[in-house]
Image (tube, helix red, strand yellow):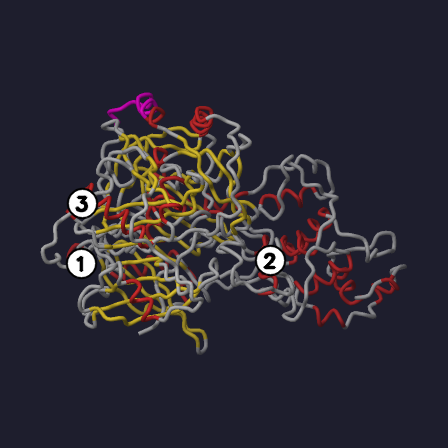
Amino acid sequence: MSKRSTNNRGPFLSRRAAKIVLTGTVGLALALPGGIAAAGDVAVQQMQIAAGEGISAKAAAAPDASKAKVTSEQAVATLKALFPTLKDANVSGTRLTNNDGSYPQNNNQLVWDIQWNVQIGSSSFGFSSRVDAISGDVLSVYLSSPLNTEGGYYPPKLTRDEALAKAKAFIAKAAPSLKGSELKEQNSTYARATSVLFGPVQYNFIFQISKNGLPAATESVYITLDGNGEVSQFSKSYSGLEYPSAKPAISLAAAEKTYNNRFKVGLYYAPVYNNNTFDHWVLSWQPQASVQYLVDAQTGKLIDYEGREATSLTYEKVPSTKERFTPRASGKELTAEEAAKQLQQVFTIPAGRKLLNQTLGGQPDQDSKTWQLAWQAEDSFVSGAPSRTYAEIDASTGEIKQIQLEQYMTAENKPVLPAPAGGKKLTQAEAKQKAIALINRLYNKAADSLLLAEHGGTWSVLSGGQGYRYEFVRQYQGIPVLDGSIALTIDSYGRVKTYTNYSLGSLDALKDKPAPAISEAAAKQSYLDKYKLTLEYISLGGYYTSGEYVQPQIKLAYSPHPSDGQEAILTQVLDAATGKWVSLYTGYANPADSSPPAVDIKGHPQEQQFNELLNYGVFSTDKDGKINPEQEITLGDWYSYLVKASTPYYSGGSVGTANQQPVAGVKPDSSYYNVISFALEYGWIAKDAVVKPEEKLTREGLAVQLAAFLKYSKISALLANDPVVAGFSDNASISNKGAVALAVKLGLLQADNGKFNPQQMVTKALAADVLMKLVQLQGKTDQSFTPNRY
């Protein structure tokens, strides 16, 4: 069996899926406002998945073919009529299933799962599509390579508004069960996430489906069209859950009063990221867990995203116990056997499971290596997912980073550990003391480093007598640190079921806390002014948390949303030292987050170019709203423009500099490291080149970069004696005459009064002009210079 772990982790998900993901449920509770966190359910589900907790739903019964109103042949015919490019594809298989492949799994639907195959020479490509076997609605299609082989071009045939109209017309044909009035376009970051200047033009739209006149909680339509109006991707989600009446029993005013009274803020240290890499800590006023709560529109009570009545969050100091974890000091890494022995001092491996997987590996954000161990029953593949126990142990210190009694959980999971002989089930108070004792044995200096997040009431009690759950956060001088959480669940006898321990790392950079420049009351009001409550349907449950499956349901609730109508993600916090709002995520480009119009380009010769580049996130304004068009740029700036114009979220997934090696002579701590890495990957930089990104870029240097970007460096060498360059009065001062000749012949650069001015510095204005000329050059050269983004 493969010796790889399926527990990929880190503070970020897919570049397209989300900007922000925090591991552990405390991170969710404290850092993301509930209704503010991507309408809640999606963010919560992703949080649980990121934390390594199972996602398998209850096994579905066999589909009843007699209920199908659409045959597989009709489903195939529908798809071919909607997607002309399928004429080049063959159906390799059809299967009737009772869910649409979405998560949470919906078992109340009959779906034709249709497999396609495309043969190109000796290569074969496959993809799938789904059609509702009752309504005939298309549920999902993604036309992958090689059906989508179109290169870059500009401008597109259709404007975005024209593409929107075509998308709506397509939806009417693909999903006839929907009425146009039920669709509302969402101004979504994700919808624009693949919009780039270099590459095939794509228009992405997300429409939320309405139920009873209100936005549906989890039902939407996603569609992608190219610049010619051809649809390449389509998906329609359907939860199958029952929607309650849209008439609230509680007024908005009453809901606001309840919410505002329970809303609390506290002091927290929050991590600030630059280019998705941790940069520094900021002492901030942030909402406590109450911000993730909703107001039930029928009862008027505060509820959380598990559907529980809200409780208050407090923090308690972790007391020290007699038995405490002591890191290894030998300097020698643990063997797999030693790591397993270390684990079994605090954890019971189920009988019949043997150590089958053992991998020693590292994470990008860690200096040390980690043992990834898995115990499995030999016959565990007989039915469904394997019965597997999983753990991670730091090979240097012996500290346990993760424990999963059951790595692959299902809704009908039964306890795998029998009741201990003579064992006594713990009360809630006894379980808390047991958790305190365990965290001291699991976490280094727990009493000095951690706080217990106490939610109150019966929050810690798992349903059905499954045990108890606890959450801890790191602290500095008594102030919680929001960089994930330490989560622990135990069974009713006090034995460990799950444990996760991930954080950013050192708090050494923190100094004595500054005196807050703004009071708690003023901070609370600042947050309340920033959000408003909206009546909507909310999806609760449908995921695992703390080893417990939360059944999905739809509720009518008042949910907090940004009052300015921006995307529902908390990306700013109130700096306690200055009283100003600060962004937690800076330094990366997102086409959806285009900068506001610059105040200093009105009437500039490159005004149009700047506006387009601002719209795509290639350029950005400074804090004063200026772009500074005559500012000179560096070589690193030029590469950053190319990367941002080619790749959305180009720096996504970078979580630290540990274990990273210099690239083209650029060290990992350089602000240009990510763009240079991408430039090297795309072939814009020679593999043996040494780049100095901080150096100012000259016009001749730009010509050389253009030849490399266009993949014409070798051809440009043949143009060294071209008469175009010979005609310049300053040709003697041009070193790379071929590159200059190429740039001039392609219309990218031009002379000024008979001079090329090779040593003149490149300004933002010139860079903007050249970038847009490159964009318009797409599709007009024999050799594609558009990077492959997938």
Residue 177 higher or lower than 701, as above or below: above
Residue 693 painted magenta: no
Mark 3 Cα within 10 Å, few/some/many (few <14, many 20+)? few
From the image, state whether disc 3 or disc 1 is nearer to you.
3
Which residue is pictured at 45% across the width and 74% down the height? 120
Q: Secondary structure at mark 3?
A: helix
Q: Dot 3 corresponds to which residue?
A: 463
Can residue 231 be seen?
A: yes
Q: Label 3 sits on what residue type?
A: Ser
* Residue 177 % position (x, y): 29, 45
Determine whether, in the image, residue 690 is placed left or right of residue 75.
right
- Secondary structure at numbered mark 2: helix
| Residue 760 place in picture, x, y as percent | 81, 53
Going from N to C along the chain, the mark reached first, 3 or 1, is 1
Give the label, 1 or 2, closer to the camera. Answer: 2
Front-most of residues 618 and 192: 618
As helix, strand or loop, the secondary structure at mark 1 comes to: loop
Specify the quadrant that holds the N terminus.
bottom left
Q: From which residue to which does the magenta span run? A: 247-258
Q: Position of residue 322 (x, y in %)?
A: 29, 51
Task: From the image, tell me which residue sits under label 1.
Answer: 63
Q: CA distance from mark 1 to mark 2?
A: 52 Å
What's the residue at 52%, 60% (across, down)? 658
